Amino acid sequence: PRTKPAPRGPRPFLGVKAAELRSGLPKGYSCGIAVREVQPQGPAQKGGLQDGDVVLELDGVRFDSIDAFGAAIAQHRPGDQVVFTVLRGGAVLVKVTVTLGRR
């Protein structure tokens, strides 16, 4: 699917180091984003994302690659709230709301 161009102006900032994950995911998911490191005092940490979380959805939408995840973040503006569906501890699905920062 084609994505619309990213908005002009300041870019949104999440504040994580992450990697694409394709195994060990719940049934029905083909891709997750493994959070390797959360920037201290960054938007992700303030919203409750943790090292080791696996992001499965952004605002209820699944993605098929880390590039698609980045493109989905880029569709927003700093100050926007996004809701992540996260696999935590290998078993628990939680919703985490993050207010994106400014890059």
Image: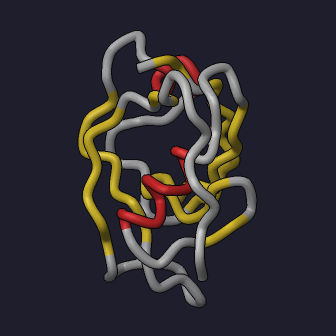
Identify the image's colour scheme: rainbow, by chain, secondary structure or one colour. secondary structure
Q: Quadrant of residue 57?
A: bottom right
Residue 10 position (above or below residue 59): above
Kindly indicate the quadrant of the structure image that contains residue 19.
bottom left
Between 46 and 74, the one nearer to me in the picture: 74
Q: Nearer the viewer, residue 98 or 69?
A: 69
At a point 43% along the width and 63% down the height, the residue shown is 90
Is residue 69 placed above or below 65 in the rendered structure? above
Q: Residue at x 51, y 22 (%)?
A: 10
How many numbered marks are there?
Answer: 0
| Front residue (pair 99, 77) | 77
Where residue 63 sits in the image (x, y, percent)?
Answer: 53, 72
Give the answer, above or below, for where 64 lies relative to 48: below
Q: Quadrant of the N terminus?
A: bottom right
Q: Is residue 101 above or below residue 33?
A: above
Furthest toward the bottom, the residue is 28
Image side of residue 101 versus residue 51, left or right: right
Q: Position of residue 89 (x, y in %)?
A: 44, 54
Asked whether, in this view, residue 12 is left or right of residue 57, the answer is: left
What residue is drawn where x is 41% and y is 20%? 103
Name the foreground residue: 35 vs 58.
58
Residue 76 place in picture, x, y as percent: 64, 39
In the orientation shown, which residue stands out farthest toward the top?
A: 41
